[in-house]
Image (cartoon, rainbow, N blue to C red):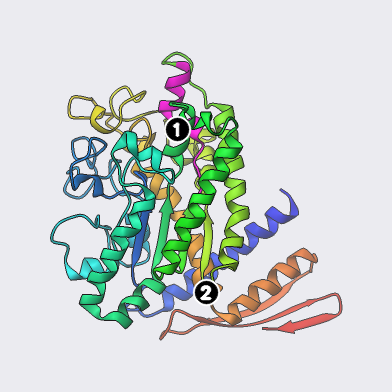
Amino acid sequence: MSTSKTIAFITLFLATTLFASCNAAANATTKPLFPAILIFGDSTVDTGNNNYPLNIFRATHFPYGIDLPDHKANGRFSNGKLIPDILAGKFNIKQFVPPFLQPNLSDQEIVTGVCFASAGSGYDDLTSLSTQAIPVSEQPKMFRNYIARLKSIVGDKKAMEIINNALVVISAGTNDMVLNFYTIPTRRLEFPFISGYHEFILKRLYGFIGELYSLGARNIAIAGLPPIGCLPIQMTAKFRNIFRFCLEQENKDSVVYNQKLQKLLPQIQSSHTGSKIFYADIYNPIFDMMQNPSKYGFTETKRGCCGTGFLETSFMCNVFSPSCPNHAEFLFFDSIHPSEATYNYIGDLLDTQILLLFHLYSNSVTKNYFENLVKALENGLAGVDSHAACSSKSTGCSSKTRVKGKGSSRTG
């Protein structure tokens, strides 16, 4: 293991341990880290907006939702919860994030956040023409309507406080690549090389983030692309049903896009004062699941649980499509979308990442502790003396740290 990876691992381990011990001692009634959660994007995070009005690309029928508490399909493209639900639960906001277009949303649902995502959408408006989805570019219109209702419930000042402190999650881009460049190469007429299309998509994303920021969003997590070449439907398109391997070039394209995205996000953050904009890695967790399925309890990674698992998704995955009995052993539930088990693993990783960024690092003392710790590890110090105490009245930790080495000592 390289030195940088070792440092990252040790720091992450100690940070997670420190937070866990502090959190356990904290009062059980501590308010959530985020007052609300707001979701934008495509089917990976759409909790049911495509039900209103009914859209051809929807998941309102069995076997979707089979592992939800009521075992009923409600628009989520999986057998159970999606990332928005998982994160909302982990941050003690609520157990399920409702779609904004759902009729008769309660005031409490509005106050704690909703989903604006639409299955089949993308950053490129052309994507939605074939799927009848709500383009990502039009989702801020719903956000504006949401803000108006939120203000009517809690008042202007409180509403903006909620939005400023809410966790905003954006997940899109896969449909753009699959529908406009790989399967139906419409955009290749304009962008002969995918690098040009990447730049086009990232420019659209830049503008989208700017619009959300102008409406008050400050804490924004942006998902990269998954290993698109490992989606069952992509393998089927290339190899049919005989040989099933991840498409190396499509995966390479995803990696390049993600690298560009990670390079762009700090630039976006620096130009939007007071924002925290960070990258949510989807590629590496899913690719590792493909490479090491037994580590995650998976027995099948190259086809979905629904039907044959080669092509079925949306209306093709239905009551007449026999599904596997062991949903948790499949990486994918249909030919495109991950199973709840997969989302749970990714949710755990994002939970840790977000906690480190927004909770631990927000405390100046803890910030100094980790800065000194990383420096100590980089310098190969023999030891680090530390003392951390948790207050039972708050989620914060007071920490006194003395780092010894190379003739210097620092106290945080």
- Image quadrant containing the C terminus: bottom right
Question: Which image quarter: residue 15?
Answer: bottom right
Question: Which mark, residue 180?
Answer: 1
Vertical position of residue 305 compared to residue 19: above or below: above
Q: What stretch is highlighted in magenta?
A: 223-239
Question: Which mark, residue 370?
Answer: none
Q: SS at mark 1?
A: helix
> Any magenta on residue 238?
yes
Name which residue lies at 13% across and 61% down. Answer: 104
Using the image as rendered, state which of residue 22 and residue 82 is in the foreground: 82
Name which residue lies at 37% across and 66% down. Answer: 91
Q: Which of marks 1 and 2 is nearer the N terminus?
A: 1
Query: How far separated are the C-alphas under marks 1 and 2?
Result: 35 Å
Tags 1 and 2 in contact by the CB under 8 Å rule? no
Main secondary structure type of the part rendered in magenta: helix
Q: SS at mark 2?
A: loop
Q: Horizontally, is 384 left or right of 290 in the view? A: right
Task: Bin the neighbour count of mark 1 within 10 Å (Cα to Cα): few under 14, some 14-19, many 20 and up.
Answer: some
Residue type marked 2:
Gly
The residue singled out by tag 2 in the image is 274
Using the image as rendered, state which of residue 96 and residue 238 is in the foreground: 238
Name which residue lies at 16% across and 66% down. Answer: 106
Rendered location of residue 35, percent (x, y): 34, 72
Residue lying farthest to the right in this orientation: 407
Vertical position of residue 292 compared to residue 89: above or below: above
Q: Horizontally, is 149 left or right of 275 in the view? A: left
Q: Can residue 33 be seen in this view?
A: no
